[in-house]
Amino acid sequence: MADKTDKSTILIVDDEIVSRYTVEALLSSEGYNLVFAECGEDALEKATELVPDLMLLDVMMPGMDGFEVCSHLRANPRLAELPVVMVTALDDRESRLRGLQVGADDFMSKPFDRAELRARIRTITRLNRYRRLVETEEKLVYLANYDTLTGLPNRNLLMERMRQTLGRANRNHQGVTVLTLDLDNFQMINESLGHEVGDNLLREVAQRLTGLISEGATVARLSGDEFVVFEEADDPVKQVSDTAQRILDRISKSMTFDNHEIVITASVGISVFPSDGEEAATLLKNANAALSRAKSQGKNTYQFFTTEMNTVAIKRLILENQLRKVLERNELCLYYQPQISLTTGRIAGMEALIRWQHPELGFVPPGQFISVAEEMGLIIPIGEWVLRTACLQNQAWQTAGLPKVRIAVNVSSRQFQQPNLLQAIKDILIETRLNPTYLELELTESLLMEEDHDKKNSVFATLSELQGMGVHIAIDDFGTGYSSLSYLKRFPVNILKVDRSFVKDIGTNKDDAAITTAIIAMAHSLQLSVVAEGVETTEQLTFLHQRQCELIQGYFFSPPIPVKDMTKLLVSNDAQPFVIPPLP
Ligand code: C2E
Ligand code: MG
Ligand code: MG
């Protein structure tokens, strides 16, 4: 390193020439670069010009005194950190206090003691040099890892972060998505409007990207107009196609620079860990291959590296778009599945199950679209429609003089958490004039397992009020969640529905048999009734009958059927109940 940069510069400010000489003599052999100022104004000027490593500042000077100089320094961002040693009269406590208040770092008094002066100055300049070194190093580290134009991580940091994330994802069996983005026709903008506009545009794109991504994600700029976004994902294909679409939408919104309105689009390529590669470099390479395909497909679009993933993403997009119109187009209907009492053979209740008949997609089973509707928030209007339709239908059957049975409606957790659910149910009951005792709500275990204290209390309050009105509460798919007895005891619940997966293998799987037996016994000890779902065979029926399961729902008696068929079944069952196979 050059001698000059290695030497610390000390600015000595003193109006008395004798004092200046003394300091010069005392420090001459120490190898500092000494600069002198004779008054406050001179001191500030030189400090601004040189940014010294230390200022030795006499307090008592005509004109601008040392205190004033120090306050000026502290108000200047470039000099605020400059170490200042104030020279005061010996034991002048008042001056030292004032000195501290205006920002002095240390004090000395005249006449100077050679050893003390040298020692103090050495310590302070060493500390200051060290600080500068750290700053330089930080700057170097920054330059090595960040892109100076946009402030985004550069390729170096991207690769480092990807390696870390991939390692973690591998341990946790998580997916990682890598999305590479390239602006369409960026070169044309650069050439026609100049590089400055081009740079501003890149900064704007960087900001838009940063604003879009979720917390754990990283956006990096690799070069030119090439950006990368990557993150861990539970459901990679869905998450990354959502992100890609949002990015394309956001980028294509117009930007204005120097009164030029610019609209630019981007193309995106996507690869997914682990299916498209296990290493950062491979994933980037494959995302770039997908990016080229997106470009050749006419730009402003995204492509997955794996072709099947495109199909899944497109299907889902179609599904979402179609689902938005499902209510206005009247494409939903309800099927009803009876629940038969094992003591009487009569229909004691029924479950309303949603069906979606789409003119082109055909029949879409609820297992495929309910979760999508939940994510989109559409489950709230759809759920209300189900509730209203089921209550109306039940009331219609009752008005027609058919046997009065309870109708069970599935309510998803997301729907249950909407703040006005209770009011919506009350309104529907009033509107349809259905007696609340003929309505049952099927909830999932997860709802009762809510960990947030306030939410848990609000679930409890809602359930209590519903039960107080006469509405029955059933826990659906029981046994698949956490099956804790303690919460069942605490929550207002009437019915447990044993999940179909246990019933299925009751006859062959000892564990399933034991679990089912335990659930029934436990439910009875808590004065809850049990409905077994998915009962298809005599063997299953007999097993459940022996354990005093009250109600049976399943293909053994009837699959879910449309209104017309259910009306017939209600009539015939009233005249002639199902025959329950006798116990062996
Ligand atoms: P779930 O509430 O557990 O409904 C029982 C499912 O088991 C129904 O499937 C029914 O058709 C089927 N099932 C009944 N008996 C048998 C049988 O003997 N064997 C077999 N293999 N299956 C049987 P579905 O109708 O496809 O409904 C699937 C799930 O979709 C429902 O499970 C429920 O969680 C949800 N769902 C249906 N309708 C609605 C609704 O209106 N709102 C909400 N939020 N979810 C709904
Ligand atoms: Mg159900
Ligand atoms: Mg169920």
Image (cartoon, grey):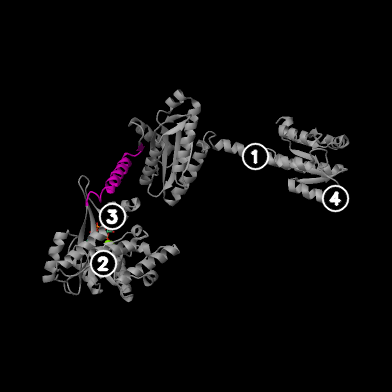
Between the residue at mark 1 and the residue at mark 4, the CA separation in whole angstroms equals 36 Å
Which residue has dot 4 on it? 91
Depth check: 543 or 352 in front? Answer: 352
Counting from the top left corner in percent of width and height, residue 187 is at: 43, 26
Q: Please tell me whether the stretch drawn in magenta is mainly helix, strand or loop.
A: helix
Q: Mark 3, residues whose alpha carbon is within 10 Å: few (<14), some, or many (≥20)?
A: many
- Taking 49 as reference, is 315 above or below it? below
In the image, which residues are magenta? 302-331
Residue 119: quarter of image: top right
Between the residue at mark 2 and the residue at mark 3, the CA separation in whole angstroms equals 18 Å
Residue depicted at x 34% and y 52%: 377
Which residue has dot 2 on it? 439
Residue kind at label 3, given as amino acid type: Ile
Residue kind at label 1, given as amino acid type: Glu
Q: Which numbered disc, 4 or 3, marks the residue that appears first in the sequence?
A: 4
Which residue has dot 1 on it? 135
Residue 518: quarter of image: bottom left
